[in-house]
Image (cartoon, grey):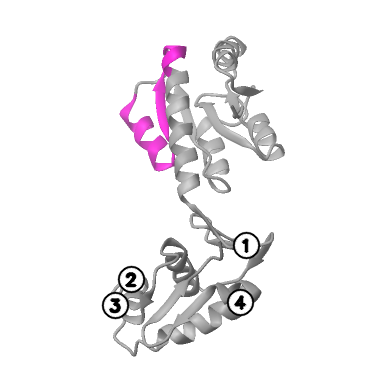
Amino acid sequence: MEKYKILVVDDESRMRKLVSDFLVKNQYQVLEAADGEEALDVFFRENDIALVILDVMMPRMDGWQVCKEIRAESKVPIIMLTAKNDERDELQGFELGVDEYISKPFSPKILVARVGAILRRTVQASAEAKLEAGGIVVDKSAHIVTIDGREVDLSFKEFELLVYFIENKGIALSREKILNSVWNYDYFGDARTIDTHVKKLRSKLGSRGELIKTIWGLGYKLEIEG
């Protein structure tokens, strides 16, 4: 089982220990920070933190600012802890991209259960966002395509076209079907625009471009050998 790394941020050492002990018992790896500035130092030093548990009221830099700084660079799940029971605080948290909002005092067991639920959702979403076919790796959420670790620069439509081919690999696709699916019925030009985009896509994929086969009189098919 993979040990997910969790950053616990709270200026109260007793609270950090309570949360950390429960997380460690549930097979999580825990890093701690006592204030907002330390939290950012730890977060940006480590590159594999899976989730942040973040207190709102802290010295030097509060939880809201820490959340803003993290959200500017990362979509890592964040659970906010607060002693306040204020709807405005909760709304602010969700506007900043907070995944969960828990008021103190709380049950550590409930907190750990929520951590587990969020990580399961995150891992599933991450897996669904990544496609692979014939050595072509597509990260749909980051909009990145790589081949043998090398990033391939595709236009928006080329990217959408490649995703469509991979999601329908092995299936013969007519030009009209491709046009309707990738251009979402909002393109009224000649279906031969598909040929132009496929030609450019093949060129950018290098030798992997050969995986996109022409079906004469119909359209195209992404065919993976074996």
Numbered disc 4: secondary structure:
helix
Question: What kind of element bears circle 2?
Answer: helix
Badge nearest the viewer, 1 or 3: 1
Q: Position of residue 209 (x, y in %)?
A: 58, 75
Question: Label 3: which residue?
Answer: 186
Query: Distance from label 4 to label 3 (Cα)?
Result: 25 Å
- Quickly name the residue at label 1: 146
Vertical placement of 147 versus 21: above or below?
below
- Residue type of the residue flagged with mark 3: Asp
Q: Are marks 1 and 3 in contact (CB under 8 Å)?
A: no
Of the numbered discs 1 and 3, the one sitting upstream in the chain is: 1
Label located before the other in sequence (4 or 3): 3
Nearer to us in this view, 108 or 64:
108
Which residue bears the numbered disc 2?
A: 181
Quadrant of the image occupied by residue 99: top left
Q: Mark 4 or mark 3, which is nearer to you?
A: 4
Question: What's the residue type where badge 2 is placed?
Answer: Ser
